[in-house]
Amino acid sequence: GAVVSQHPSRVICKSGTSVKIECRSLDFQATTMFWYRQFPKQSLMLMATSNEGSKATYEQGVEKDKFLINHASLTLSTLTVTSAHPEDSSFYICSALAGVMIDTQYFGPGTRLTVL
Amino acid sequence: AQSVTQLDSHVSVSEGTPVLLRCNYSSSYSPSLFWYVQHPNKGLQLLLKYTSAATLVKGINGFEAEFKKSETSFHLTKPSAHMSDAAEYFCVVRDGYGGATNKLIFGTGTLLAVQP
């Protein structure tokens, strides 16, 4: 149980285009989802926290207009990288909580974004 | 602010020998601490967690960690390494006082290599 999927696993796009990444909880309802960014050979940095039906809370330094997060249902959150540039190339990982009383985050396999 | 420091970026062991991955934490509260493992092209998997219960925590795949408040450490150990243990390991502390929705703060990771 507690499986989180991400789609796509890899995406290559041209500079200036927008890319949408999906994060789904497959066998549980996720009240809260998190989006992380991981640079090569570095740790994960939290970008934002999203709760179903409400606006995401962004970490300091993360541009909310560039990284649009939508948590429209209890099983789906999306991250849209708008007007992507090469510096946005990274590994994006989502995680999900099954509920506030369940304190384990379940992570997706990640999405490798390459912006040319 | 809470933080974790992973003292070794790379650790190499021979198959069948013990594994020790070191982690020190900084926290104003009684922390919640986790170890996650990341295999290539796979999502992060929770190995074990400490949330103020028993100080010796047993996890999956034969791993365990001991919470030592006097040393502010939470080192990960395994008596006998297996080739399949080769991966990146992250020590993680949860920010704030309690609260499953509080963000996770990741260490910089330790890459474990297992030699045949």
Image (spheres, helix red, strand yellow):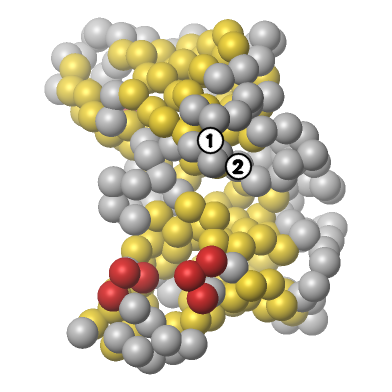
Q: Which mark is residue A22?
A: none
| The one of A59 and A55 positioned closer to us in this rendering | A55
Q: Residue at x 54, y 66 (%)?
A: B60
Q: Is residue A23 above or below residue B31?
A: above
| The one of B6 and B62 positioned closer to us in this rendering | B62
| The one of B26 and A34 positioned closer to us in this rendering | A34
- Residue A11's x, y, as percent? 22, 24
> Mark 2 and 1 residues: CB-CB less than 8 Å, in contact?
yes
Q: Amino acid at mark 2?
A: Gln
The reply to whether residue B28 is in sight is: yes
Helix, strand or loop for disc 2: loop
Q: Can you identify the residue that label 2 sits on?
A: A105
Q: Residue at x 30, y 9 (%)?
A: A18
Q: Residue at x 47, y 45 (%)?
A: A44
Q: Amino acid at mark 1?
A: Ser
The chain identifier of the residue carrying mark 1 reads A
Q: Can you identify the residue that label 1 sits on?
A: A95
